[in-house]
Image (cartoon, grey):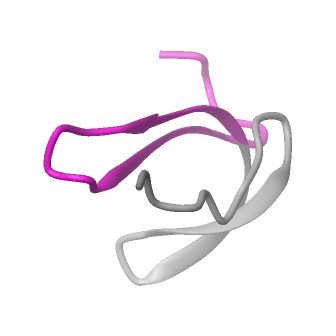
């Protein structure tokens, strides 16, 4: 059974970048072969690169 995703695409989340927490938006989520979940995010106000 695939793992349940905690967040949905487009949802606003708080993410660590080093010791600081920033607001971010979840762009995409993937379930890997080893059943780990990988989230792709974009930090609010940051350059798209």
**38 vs 41, nearest the viewer:** 38
Check the image and report above or below for 47 versus 10: above
Q: Residue at x 26, y 53 (%)?
A: 35
Looking at the picture, tell me which residue is in the foreground, 4 or 27. Answer: 4
Outermost residue on the front side: it is 1
Q: Position of 6 compared to 25: left or right? A: left
Span of residues in magenta = 26-49
Q: Residue 11's spot in the image, x, y percent?
A: 85, 47
Q: Is residue 1 magenta?
A: no
Residue at the image point whose x is 43% and y is 51% from the top = 2
Q: Residue at x 77, y 46 (%)?
A: 8
Point out the residue furthest to the left here: 34
Who is closer to the viewer here, 5 or 13? 5
Which residue is farthest top? 49
Residue 47, located in which quarter of the rendered image? top right
Taking the spot 41% from the left edge, 55% from the top edge, the residue there is 1
Query: Horizontal and vertical percent for residue 12?
Result: 85, 53
The quadrant where residue 5 appears: bottom right
Q: Vertical placement of 7 versus 39: above or below?
A: below
């Amino acid at each position: 059974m695939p793992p349940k995703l905690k967040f949905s695409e487009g949802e606003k989340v708080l993410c660590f970048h080093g010791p600081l927490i920033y607001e971010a938006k979840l762009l995409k989520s993937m379930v890997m072969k080893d059943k780990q979940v990988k989230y792709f995010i974009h930090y609010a106000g940051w350059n798209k690169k």
